[in-house]
Image (cartoon, helix red, strand yellow):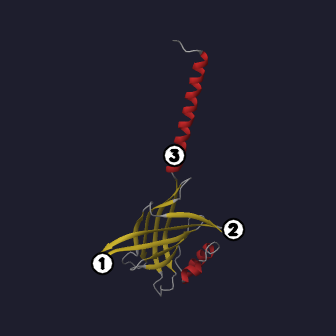
């Protein structure tokens, strides 16, 4: 039995609709699961600013990270961070940032529209006495060229600002980040 032109036309429309629906499903899944990356690289001097720093304030930092922007999910952070005393010695932090455990989000001051990125996550070290979880949080400037990072564990604690070779440079970065967050309150708690 031969198909009528009207039946052929309906079948063609049904195939087109099915193809469009399938394409939309693929696009939505791609937008949900596939991020677009933004590179973050901060290398150089870091200045320790927390109240327990004493005279030991000179450090170096290397943050090589990628912010993974998702359309329908929370953004994630992946990469590696290393913080060392400037004079040498054991690293305060030398860890990978696992994207499933590290969140990053933009925060905007409503009155001024100033924006910084807040990130947080953790890593776990295993020692003879058992696991030691280190909580880390921080801020990135809007242009991703400066940061404040807080490392908080039983063994290592400190708040570092980078890139800042001295207190004056650290104050400039604190002022910039302070337009959105209470940085001094964070440091002095």
* Residue 69 position in % (x across, y down): 54, 56
Q: Secondary structure at mark 1?
A: loop
* Residue 85 position in % (x across, y down): 42, 78
Q: Is residue 3 visible from the viewing direction of this image? A: yes
Do the numbered discs 1 and 3 sit on residues whose CB atoms are within 8 Å? no
Residue under numbered circle 3: 30
Q: CA distance from mark 1 to mark 3?
A: 44 Å
Q: Image quadrant of residue 8? A: top right
* Residue 139 position in % (x across, y down): 55, 70
Residue under numbered circle 1: 129
Residue at the right extreme of this rendering: 111
Pointer 1 or 3: first along the chain: 3
In this picture, residue 59 sits left or right of residue 125: right
Q: CA distance from mark 2 to mark 1?
A: 46 Å
Q: Quadrant of the C terminus?
A: bottom right
Pointer 2 or 1: first along the chain: 2
Q: Residue at x 47, y 66 (%)?
A: 63
Do the numbered discs 2 and 1 sit on residues whose CB atoms are within 8 Å? no
Between 162 and 179, the residue placed more toward the observer is: 179
* Residue 185 position in % (x across, y down): 58, 81
The label shown at residue 110 is 2
In this picture, residue 4 sits left or right of residue 133: right
Dot 2: few (<14), some (14–19), or many (≥20) neighbours within 10 Å? few
């Amino acid at each position: 039995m031969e198909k009528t032109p009207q039946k052929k036309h309906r079948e063609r429309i049904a195939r087109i609709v099915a193809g469009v629906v399938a394409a939309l499903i693929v696009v939505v899944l791609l937008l949900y699961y596939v991020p677009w990356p933004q590179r973050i690289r901060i290398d150089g001097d870091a200045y320790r600013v927390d109240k327990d720093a004493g005279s030991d304030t000179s450090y170096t930092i290397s943050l090589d990270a990628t912010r993974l922007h998702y359309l329908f999910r929370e953004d994630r952070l992946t990469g590696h961070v290393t913080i060392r005393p400037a004079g040498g010695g054991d690293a305060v932090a030398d860890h990978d940032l696992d994207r499933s455990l590290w969140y990053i989000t933009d925060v905007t001051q409503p009155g001024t529209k100033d924006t910084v990125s807040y990130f947080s996550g953790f890593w776990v070290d295993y020692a003879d006495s058992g696991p030691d979880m280190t909580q880390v949080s921080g801020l990135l400037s809007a242009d991703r060229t400066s940061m404040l990072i807080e490392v908080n564990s039983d063994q290592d604690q400190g708040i570092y600002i980078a890139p800042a070779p001295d207190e004056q440079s650290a104050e400039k970065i604190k002022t910039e980040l302070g337009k959105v967050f209470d940085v001094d309150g964070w440091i002095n708690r």
